[in-house]
């Protein structure tokens, strides 16, 4: 992997599992469950100057990454609830890069850490209660032009949290921040 690709995808690019496996999805749910605590710990001692440092040239700042995680995971949570209550609903895409430029992305990370802590409690409650039939339910994503099963979304968001957490941890390591 090229150096820029390694900075962009420190845990590798997401590859959807080939099929639903209960054990694999259980591991993914545990990753989703652990993310808020791990993220809070990763940013705990960072100054505003450090939080406003991009994780790579041309990339988001740590602050933007934390707020992006809250935005993205709220959308994923809502999409899962839609799929659980409607027949293959079409979800609305959003411009995540533009969201990261809105004024709320300049706020203290505490607000998004609080959102993630509470959102993930609710999200994990739903995920742990889902049976195989529910995990096979889908929503239609117009940008992907396909129906996406919920088990794949669970795997994606386990990866997504680890992906952005690695951005923060790698920057801290490279700058020797504690």
Image (cartoon, rainbow, N blue to C red):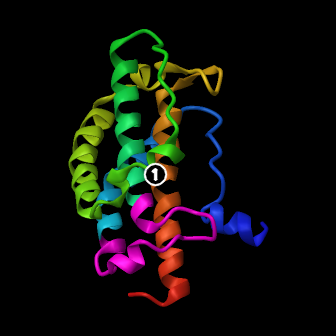
Q: Residue at x 53, y 34 (%)?
A: 152
Q: Does the magenta stretch include residue 57?
A: yes
Q: Residue at x 63, y 70 (%)?
A: 57
Q: How crowded is mark 1: few (under 14 residues within 10 Å), some or many (20 or more)?
A: few
Q: In which quarter of the image is the N terminus?
A: bottom right
Q: Which residue is drawn at 20% across and 48% down?
A: 118
> Quick one: 177 or 54, which is closer to the camera?
54
Per the rendered image, the range of residues in magenta is 41-65
- Compared with residue 177, is residue 134 higher up or lower down, i.e. above or below? above
Q: Residue at x 34, y 39 (%)?
A: 74
> Quick one: 77 or 129, which is closer to the camera?
77
**Image-based side of 121 in relation to 8, left or right:** left
Q: Quadrant of the C terminus?
A: bottom left
Q: Residue placed farthest to the right in the image? A: 2
- Compared with residue 21, is residue 27 higher up or lower down, i.e. above or below? below
Q: What residue would you read off at disc 1?
A: 101
Q: Does the magenta stretch include residue 84?
A: no
x then y, percent, for residue 139:
49, 20
- Compared with residue 115, is residue 127 higher up or lower down, i.e. above or below? above
Label 1 residue SS: loop
The number of numbered badges drawn on the structure is 1
Q: Residue placed farthest to the top in the image? A: 87
x then y, percent, for residue 18:
65, 35
Q: Quadrant of residue 46?
A: bottom left
> Quick one: 95 or 113, which is closer to the camera?
95
């Amino acid at each position: 992997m090229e150096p820029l690709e390694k900075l962009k995808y420190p845990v590798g690019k997401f590859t959807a599992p080939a099929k639903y496996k209960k054990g694999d999805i259980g591991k993914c749910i545990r990753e989703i469950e652990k993310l808020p605590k791990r993220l809070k710990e990763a940013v705990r001692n960072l100054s505003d100057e450090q939080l406003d440092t991009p994780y790579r040239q041309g990339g988001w700042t740590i602050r933007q990454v934390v707020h992006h995680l809250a935005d993205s995971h709220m959308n994923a949570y809502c999409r899962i609830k839609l799929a659980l209550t409607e027949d293959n609903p079409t979800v609305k895409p959003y411009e995540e890069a533009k969201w990261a430029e809105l004024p709320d992305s300049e706020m203290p990370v505490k607000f998004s850490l609080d959102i993630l802590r509470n959102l993930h409690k609710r999200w994990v409650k739903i995920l742990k209660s889902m049976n195989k039939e529910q995990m096979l339910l889908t929503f239609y994503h117009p940008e992907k032009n396909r129906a996406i099963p919920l088990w794949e979304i669970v795997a994606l968001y386990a990866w997504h949290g680890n992906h952005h957490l690695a951005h923060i941890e790698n920057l801290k390591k490279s700058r020797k921040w504690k």
